[in-house]
Image (cartoon, rainbow, N blue to C red):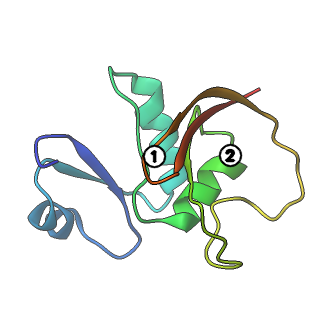
Amino acid sequence: MNAFPKYVVSRTLSAEEAASRWNNTTLLGGGDGIEAIRSLRARGGDGGLQVWGSASLARQLVENDLVDEYQLMLEPVVLGGGKTIFPSDGQARPLELVSVKQAPTGVLICAYRPA
């Protein structure tokens, strides 16, 4: 994990703090994380971006049509609550199933792309 480049979107961390916490890290600053991600995507590259640990950032990416593929893990458990990555604006966002794999635990690992 340390070898991979990491981009941190934060309103509270400085670039120095982000770099001191994680190796190979760049803080996407400027106050507008969505615009910083748009710029990063426009530069291209050989890999994709993943969101780890921020339901609010994931929701903003969905709202701004910046998700190329969803990797969703469907667990064989119903919790009935919790944080969501999906906007509450009522807008339909059709998806196309790209692949599905079943783990030995019964978890379904599904890849979807916007249709």
The quarter holding residue 17 reads bottom left
Mark carried by residue 102: none
| Residue designated by label 2 | 64
Residue 77: x and y, percent? 60, 68
Q: Note whether 112 is above or below 75 in the view shown.
A: above
Report crowding for label 1: few under 14, some 14 to 19, many 20 or more residues within 10 A (C-alpha). Answer: some
**What's the residue at 14%, 67% (across, down)?**
21
Per the image, the residue denoted by label 1 is 36
Q: Are marks 2 and 1 in contact (CB under 8 Å)?
A: no
Q: Amino acid at mark 2?
A: Asn
Q: Is residue 21 left or right of residue 83?
A: left
- For label 2, the SS is loop
In this rendering, position of residue 21 left or right of residue 104: left
Mark positioned earlier in the residue sequence (2 or 1):
1
Image quadrant of residue 115?
top right
Q: How many residues crowd mark 2 within 10 Å: few (<14), some (14–19), many (20+)?
A: few
Whether residue 28 appears in this view of the structure is no
Amino acid under label 1?
Answer: Ala
Q: Residue at x 58, y 39 (%)?
A: 110
Q: Is residue 16 left or right of residue 105?
A: left
| Residue 94 shows up from this direction | yes
